[in-house]
Image: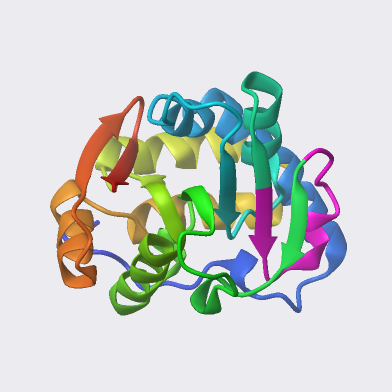
């Protein structure tokens, strides 16, 4: 197994023609993955100390990250995704159907613009494109939380999904996601290509967080 570069294998979740019950099962399990494997903490540790920030969560999926943030801190969050099925799970966040590759917002529209476990779905060129647009519409901060491509992360998720997952989508996409993910230098290279001044931090257990402050 080669972990030296990003894989380009497709993920089932990116096929919006899949039946609704497959997405429902995956969303339920991914909420637990984000809760227990560091997805929420990777965002909260870098959020700025400011009253009631307005946040945009792009490619929000099942909106679980944003809903968890709203329960923890005073904030307002707009969740955007091209798949309306996940947006139905928004309770306190405000859903918008839209494409992260064509963000329909003015400059400096949000205090914070974030993306969680989304960039590994994209090519490097599309990562540059999206990050540049996130920077354009962010007033204070851009956060990109994604997976760290590492053999331990890969084999761990294979074992966990094999034993505990009932979702075909999660069992397939979990290991593929890690192989499509990043090393820190790769995220920094994307930031440099986008003209975005950023730092990349490790977050336990196998997350990387790109942080760009204005």
Q: Give the percent coordinates (x, y) of residue 16.
A: 71, 75
Residue 9 drawn above or below residue 142: below
Reply yes or no: does residue 85 show up in magenta: yes
Judge by depth and name the residue closer to the eye, 52 or 85.
52
**Residue at left 37%, top 76%?**
126
Residue 125 drawn above or below residue 96: below
Q: Quadrant of the N terminus?
A: bottom left
Q: Is residue 27 left or right of residue 122?
A: right
Residue 89 drawn above or below residue 152: below
Picture quadrant where residue 187 is located: bottom left
Q: Give the percent coordinates (x, y) of residue 2.
A: 20, 59
Q: How is the image coloured?
A: rainbow
Picture quadrant where residue 55 is located: top right
**Residue at left 49%, top 73%?**
10
Magenta range is 78-92
**Residue at left 48%, top 27%?**
50
**Residue at left 27%, top 64%?**
6
Reply yes or no: does residue 175 show up in magenta: no
Judge by depth and name the residue closer to the eye, 7 or 185.
185
Q: Give the percent coordinates (x, y) of residue 77.
A: 66, 44
Judge whether residue 36 can be spotted in this image.
yes
Across the whole image, how many numbered discs are drawn on residues? 0
Picture quadrant where residue 179 is located: bottom left
Q: Is residue 152 left or right of residue 51?
A: left
Judge whether residue 2 can be spotted in this image.
no
Q: Give the percent coordinates (x, y) of residue 208.
A: 31, 41
């Amino acid at each position: 197994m080669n972990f030296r570069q990003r894989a380009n294998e497709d993920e089932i979740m990116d096929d919006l023609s899949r039946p609704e019950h497959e997405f429902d099962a995956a969303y339920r399990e991914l909420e637990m993955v984000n809760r227990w494997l560091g997805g929420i903490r990777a965002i909260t540790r870098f959020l700025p100390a400011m009253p009631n920030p307005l946040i945009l969560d792009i490619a929000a999926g099942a909106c679980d990250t944003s809903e968890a943030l709203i329960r923890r801190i005073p904030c307002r969050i707009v969740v955007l995704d091209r798949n309306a099925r996940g947006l139905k799970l928004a309770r306190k966040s405000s859903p918008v159907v839209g494409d992260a590759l064509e963000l329909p917002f003015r400059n400096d529209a949000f205090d914070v613009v974030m993306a969680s476990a989304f960039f590994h779905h994209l090519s490097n060129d599309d990562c540059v494109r999206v990050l540049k647009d996130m920077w354009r519409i962010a007033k204070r901060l851009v956060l990109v939380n994604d997976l760290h491509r590492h053999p331990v992360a890969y084999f761990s998720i294979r074992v966990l999904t094999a034993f505990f997952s009932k979702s075909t989508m999660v069992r397939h996409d979990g290991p593929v996601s890690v192989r499509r993910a990043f090393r820190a230098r790769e995220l920094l290279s994307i930031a440099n290509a986008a003209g975005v001044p950023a730092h990349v931090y490790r977050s336990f257990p196998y997350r990387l967080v790109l942080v760009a402050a204005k």
